[in-house]
Image (cartoon, grey):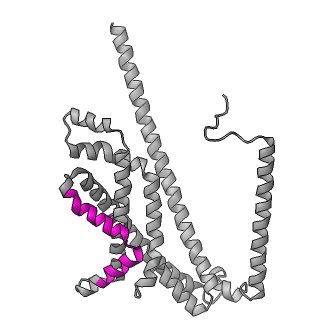
């Protein structure tokens, strides 16, 4: 079996591979030198002592349990708010995309206005305004609710645009075929277009879900009474007076969560591609069977 042919660029030859290897080694050594220089500088300034890092990595430290309990409590709030925002954003995003595609031209105007308004506002402004509006109307139910609503308002329109782009990228012939067999426009949208669009745009959707999780960190800036992971970091940093170490650990936690989400996304995408491949193979086998039966009957 021959090796696949490169389409966009020629496969590198021996000299090119040697230059790439040398460049990689030089870049790696330069990066290692920068890391060593930073560590030496931090050590000279007393930033690598056990007193500063112990509360996070030494179980024998007197503050270890309290610090991680505080971080765990904040992490629960962050994950809970992100989960609610993700579910609501997906559901409302699908609804908005469906309305924008199915309504007549005049009926789309309010939907388009809402999409452009919410998409044009920065997330931090949306969070702040939602919290202020809920307090002004006497419907404030806590800063976590404000966080969920603010994240949902912003991300639902982004997801709706992702889904709409996926639907519009599908061949027009599928819609015409569905209408030809007696399906309504709504049935074609729900049964044919939406499943394919979601599958095609799954990487973009997963990326937006990761953005939702990361945007929860903005709550600690504009929502003063929330107890999320960012606020836990602020409290820990103020108590231990080690901002460098605290935000390093919090950053590692966010990176770990995002890596888990990425792995879940790859698994889901792989399973969906396997299911689609199985259905395609079954269809091909069925067609062959029909042709063979027809040929024998003839």
The quarter in which the N terminus is drawn is top right
Q: Is residue 139 left or right of residue 236?
A: left
Vertical comparison of 16 with 90: above or below: above
Toward which corner of the image does residue 28 lie, by quadrant? bottom right
In the shown orientation, is residue 12 left or right of residue 278? right
- Taking 28 as reference, is 141 above or below it? below
Q: Is residue 94 magenta?
A: no
**Residue at 45% over, 58% down:** 206
Magenta span: helix, strand or loop, mainly?
helix
Task: Please give left or right for residue 181 compared with residue 93 in the image.
Answer: left
Q: From this viewpoint, is residue 81 visible?
A: yes
The residue shown at (36%, 76%) is 126
Most foreground residue, 54 or 219: 219
| Residue 188 coordinates in the image, percent (x, y) | 25, 42
List x then y, in percent, for residue 38: 74, 78
Count of residue discs:
0
Position of residue 228 relative to residue 170, above or below, is below
Bounds of the magenta span?
107-132
| Residue 138 on image: x %, y % | 23, 86
Establish if 27 lies above or below 280: below
């Amino acid at each position: 079996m021959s090796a696949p042919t490169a389409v966009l660029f020629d496969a590198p030859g021996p000299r090119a591979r040697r230059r790439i290897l040398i460049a990689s080694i030089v870049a790696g050594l330069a990066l290692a030198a920068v890391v060593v220089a930073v560590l030496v500088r931090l050590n000279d300034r007393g930033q690598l002592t056990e007193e500063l890092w112990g509360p996070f990595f030494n179980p024998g430290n007197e503050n270890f349990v309290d610090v991680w309990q505080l971080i765990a409590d904040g992490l629960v709030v962050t994950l809970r708010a992100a989960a609610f925002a993700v579910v609501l954003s997906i559901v409302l995003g699908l609804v908005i995309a469906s309305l924008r595609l199915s309504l007549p031209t005049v009926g789309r105007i309010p939907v388009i206005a809402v999409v452009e308004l919410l998409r044009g506002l920065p997330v931090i402004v949306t969070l702040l305004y939602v919290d202020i509006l809920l307090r002004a109307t006497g419907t404030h139910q806590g800063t976590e609710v404000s966080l969920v609503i603010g994240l949902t308002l912003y991300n639902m329109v982004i997801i709706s645009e992702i889904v709409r782009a996926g639907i519009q990228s599908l061949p027009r012939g599928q819609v015409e075929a569905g209408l030809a067999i007696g399906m309504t426009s709504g049935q074609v949208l729900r049964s044919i277009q939406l499943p394919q669009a979601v599958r095609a745009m799954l990487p973009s959707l997963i990326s937006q879900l990761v953005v939702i999780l990361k945007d929860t960190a903005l709550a600690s800036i504009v929502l003063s009474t929330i107890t999320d992971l960012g606020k836990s970091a602020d409290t820990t940093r103020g108590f231990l007076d080690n901002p460098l170490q605290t935000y390093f650990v919090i950053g590692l936690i966010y990176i770990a969560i995002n890596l888990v989400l990425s792995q879940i996304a790859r698994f889901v995408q792989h399973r969906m591609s396997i299911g689609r491949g199985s259905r395609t193979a079954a269809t091909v086998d069925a067609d062959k069977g029909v042709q063979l039966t027809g040929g024998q009957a003839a």
